[in-house]
């Protein structure tokens, strides 16, 4: 007997028995009256429908009509369903083996070809190499999948010497174990199919329906293409498919579980939305006093779900990042994305090798962290009148310049002490040097022109609400002294702490006008296309963060402070940052940079086009043999799946409309299964699809794959519903023609009563699979990169102009 069947029978022994009511014709929802397999057991027979003429328990009199068969009892029908399901367990096992083997074969076939870098292998292979080298990198995706790829590569003896520089690079020439690295994603992609098969079985589908859903995934071209390369998608999809089986059968297995209650057990596929909705519905049902649970028991249920679905996932997520940071202790290409404080924790980082204190009267360059432009000035002046009609001061231009230049250098001059001399520490007194400290008020003298940085109440060139930034002569600076004073503040350093180059992130605030230096947008031709710098009244404005990149002073020789302690950055970490601070900083950067991926791509597509396969993605191509790998879903399967989603919505609406008119077409048991099983798949499809319409970043066809899996399973479930549950009318036969009893029989009792279904249903499934197999075979050269005999053969595969196949 299957384990889930044992669960149903065991769980049923703990359930309170509630007498069932006869079907109502008052037009109300009768879902609560359905009987689920977990709530029944032959050891505890269900009460029969009330009979106004006989008391319950009185034996039935034989029907006087010799031609009318006796009506079986509900508990007998359910017991028969259990027995039949147990009888067919071997067939389920055989089906699982078949779909698993087929899935593995289709994923690993020709996996060694091409022996070159393909599409996003250039990124994820590189990330795996960084783990093996211990060099810090930045990416918008969480690290688990990339760490697994790195581990697989390490097990294959790879040392990370190659960084997957270009698409098309030869793996053999660079000594990369690409077959092993591709094999793990391929196995993950293959396992998606058997877990989908198991999920469909748990949903209550028949053997035929479950096989149909699994085989559609086996022979989908997009699922195969995306699984055979060094990519993350197959791992992410596998984790999502295994979640419902694990949560349903282990985490959420309690006295209320049933196949017809899958909406409360099958949760946590990808999004918090699916998890949240399912768990809330589950808790709402448990809270019902008629379910017989005390509040103390309810609190235990709540605590168990909170622990398994909130505390445990968050803990695991945090642990992955902890390992991520531990594996990347050295400076790498990701440094530039992180704050100086974060960078200071990495061995060999410039925060250690080039971080220097800043003496007064030294020459420095100031660089903006967000726009990477230097604070710059030159002799050119602002025009008297701008294009927007505003008038300027005709002062010296102060701009942002993107490249190192002599006009980027400024001397830091201390403000007058006004009778209160600065407090110097022992080193400063001994060496005769005063250092810039957090919170100091200074003046900036431009080295090339000899003028002082100033702001005043004149509109900036491009932002009329902000102040103009200019530079004035020493004579004018004396008469406008307060307007040349700037306070240097760092949020990461204590007040009075020495500021350092590269490491201290600062804002530069004018003392009189209380505005900060802020780069904006490129200036017109009179400003040489350089960046406008203006005075922003919002002191914490995003983009107003600067740091000192270069410092020149007599006490600094060959990049070393002669009065400072010796530094050995490759052997000792000098910086420290708590794990949670590093985690939160990285999470914020991941979110910001992911949202900023708005640059157009030749193969990007819109969410509305995905279900209809109107656009693919070119992964790799070579003119030799007209070979190419093109990500494209099996059009027949994808169109069938999205059509099934539409049919589900139509059927659901029709049922609700006629039910309002007191016409019950389905009955409470079938309706509950329809809503809970197929409805949950629809919800999962929707919540994995709709959010993409709200995103501004560039998107590709493979972003639809999670939703496609759910629409695929929905299509299989809908076929079972239409042709087994509705067309064959199995419950009526099991109930001996008693419609009242038939509407109360749980769905599993007839879907599991026979593995195949009627001739029409089996014939339809075979016909559809034949079509799907023909289409799969037709597009195989694009999935595996075979090549084509000639251009005409290739053009036959281009069904739409939007399919931008190479050489076609």
Image (cartoon, rainbow, N blue to C red):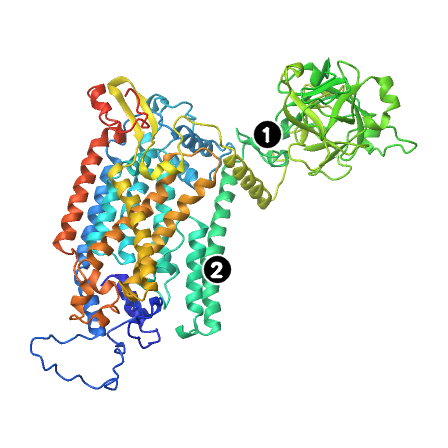
Q: Secondary structure at mark 2?
A: helix
Q: Is residue 150 above or below residue 2?
A: above
Residue 358 rendering spot, x and y as whole percentages: 74, 27
Say how many tags the image has. Answer: 2
* Residue with the mark numbered 1: 349
Quarter where residue 187 is shown = top left
Foreground residue among 205 and 19 = 19
**Spot occupied by residue 474 in the image (x, y as percentages of width and height):** 84, 18
* Residue of label 2: 306
> Reading the chain from its start, which is encountered first: label 1 or label 2?
2
How much space separates mark 1 and mark 2, taking CA atoms? Answer: 41 Å
Q: Could you classify mark 2 by the number of other residues whose Cα lies within 10 Å: few (under 14), some (14-19), or many (20 or more)?
A: few
Q: Is residue 205 left or right of residue 151?
A: left
* Observer able to see residue 259: no
Please state if 382 lies on the left or on the right of 301 as rendered.
Answer: right
Q: Is residue 49 above or below residue 684?
A: below
Q: Residue furthest right?
A: 419
- Decide if residue 532 is in sight here: yes
């Amino acid at each position: 007997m299957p384990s889930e069947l044992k669960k149903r029978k065991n769980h049923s022994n703990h359930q309170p028995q509630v007498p069932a009511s006869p079907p109502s014709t008052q037009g109300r929802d009768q879902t609560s009256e359905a009987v689920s397999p977990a709530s029944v057991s032959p050891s505890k027979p269900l009460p029969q429908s009330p009979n106004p003429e006989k008391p319950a328990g009185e034996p039935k009199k034989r029907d006087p009509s010799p031609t009318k068969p006796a009506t079986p009892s509900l508990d007998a029908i359910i017991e028969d369903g259990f027995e039949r399901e147990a009888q067919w367990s071997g067939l389920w096992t055989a089906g699982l083996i078949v779909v698993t083997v087929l899935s593995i074969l289709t994923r690993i076939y020709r996996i060694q070809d091409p022996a070159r870098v393909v599409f996003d292998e250039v990124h994820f292979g590189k990330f795996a190499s960084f783990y093996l080298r211990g060099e810090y990198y930045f990416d918008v995706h969480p690290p688990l999948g990339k760490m697994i790829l790195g581990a697989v590569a390490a097990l294959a003896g790879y040392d990370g010497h190659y960084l997957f520089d270009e698409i098309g690079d030869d793996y053999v020439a660079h000594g990369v174990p690409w077959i092993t690295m591709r094999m793990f994603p391929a196995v993950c992609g293959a396992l998606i199919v058997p877990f989908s098969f198991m999920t469909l079985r748990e949903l209550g589908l028949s053997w035929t329906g479950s096989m149909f859903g699994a085989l559609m995934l086996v022979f989908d071209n997009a699922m195969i293409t995306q699984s055979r390369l060094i990519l993350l998608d197959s791992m992410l999809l596998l984790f999502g498919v295994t979640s419902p089986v694990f949560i349903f059968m282990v985490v959420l297995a309690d006295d209320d579980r049933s196949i017809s209650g899958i909406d409360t057990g099958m949760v946590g596929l990808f999004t918090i939305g699916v998890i949240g909705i399912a768990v809330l519905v589950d808790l709402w049902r448990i809270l019902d006093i008629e379910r017989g649970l005390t509040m103390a028991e309810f609190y235990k249920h709540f605590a168990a779900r909170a622990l398994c679905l909130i505390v445990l996932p968050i803990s695991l997520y945090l642990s992955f990042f902890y390992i991520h940071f531990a594996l990347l202790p050295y400076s790498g290409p990701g440094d530039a994305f992180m704050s100086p404080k974060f960078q200071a924790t990495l061995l060999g980082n410039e925060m250690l090798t080039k971080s220097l204190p800043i003496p007064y009267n030294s020459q420095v360059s100031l660089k903006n962290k967000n726009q990477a432009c230097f604070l710059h000035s030159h002799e050119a002046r602002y025009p008297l009148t701008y294009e927007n009609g505003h008038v300027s001061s005709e002062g010296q231009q102060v701009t942002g310049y993107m490249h190192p230049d002599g006009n980027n250098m400024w001397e830091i001059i201390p403000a007058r002490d006004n009778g209160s001399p600065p407090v110097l520490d022992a080193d400063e007194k001994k060496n005769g040097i005063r250092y810039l400290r957090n919170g100091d008020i200074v003046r900036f003298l431009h080295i090339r022109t000899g003028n002082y940085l100033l702001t005043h109440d004149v509109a900036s060139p491009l932002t009329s609400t902000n102040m103009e930034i200019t530079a004035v002569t020493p004579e004018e600076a004396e008469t406008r002294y307060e307007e040349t004073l700037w306070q240097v503040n760092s949020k990461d350093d204590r007040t009075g702490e020495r500021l350092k180059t590269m490491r201290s992130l600062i804002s530069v605030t004018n003392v009189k006008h209380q505005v900060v230096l802020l780069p904006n947008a490129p200036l017109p031709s009179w400003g040489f296309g350089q960046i406008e710098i203006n005075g922003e009244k919002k002191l914490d404005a995003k983009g107003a963060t600067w740091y000192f990149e270069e410092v020149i002073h007599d006490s600094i020789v060959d990049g070393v402070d002669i009065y400072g302690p010796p530094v050995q950055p490759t052997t000792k970490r000098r910086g420290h940052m708590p794990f949670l601070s590093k985690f939160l900083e990285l999470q914020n950067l991941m979110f910001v940079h992911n949202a900023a991926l708005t640059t157009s791509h030749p193969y990007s597509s819109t969410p509305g086009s995905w279900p209809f396969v109107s656009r693919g993605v070119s992964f790799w191509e070579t003119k030799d043999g007209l070979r190419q790998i093109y990500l494209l879903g099996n059009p027949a399967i994808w169109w069938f799946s999205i059509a099934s989603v539409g049919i589900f919505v139509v059927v659901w609406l029709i049922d609700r409309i006629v039910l309002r008119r007191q016409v019950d077409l389905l009955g409470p048991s079938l309706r509950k299964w329809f809503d809970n099983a197929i409805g949950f798949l629809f919800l999962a499809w929707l919540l994995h699809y709709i959010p993409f319409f709200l995103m501004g970043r560039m998107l590709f066809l493979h972003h639809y794959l999670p939703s496609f899996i759910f629409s695929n399973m929905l299509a299989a479930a809908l076929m079972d519903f239409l042709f087994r549950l509705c067309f064959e009318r199995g419950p009526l036969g099991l109930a001996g023609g008693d419609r009242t009893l038939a509407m109360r029989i749980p769905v599993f009792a007839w879907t599991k009563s026979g593995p195949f279904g009627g001739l029409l249903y089996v014939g339809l499934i075979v016909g559809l699979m034949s079509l799907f197999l023909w289409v799969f075979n037709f597009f195989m050269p694009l999935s595996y990169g075979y090549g084509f005999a000639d251009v005409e053969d290739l053009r036959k595969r281009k069904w739409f102009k939007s399919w931008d196949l190479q050489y076609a």
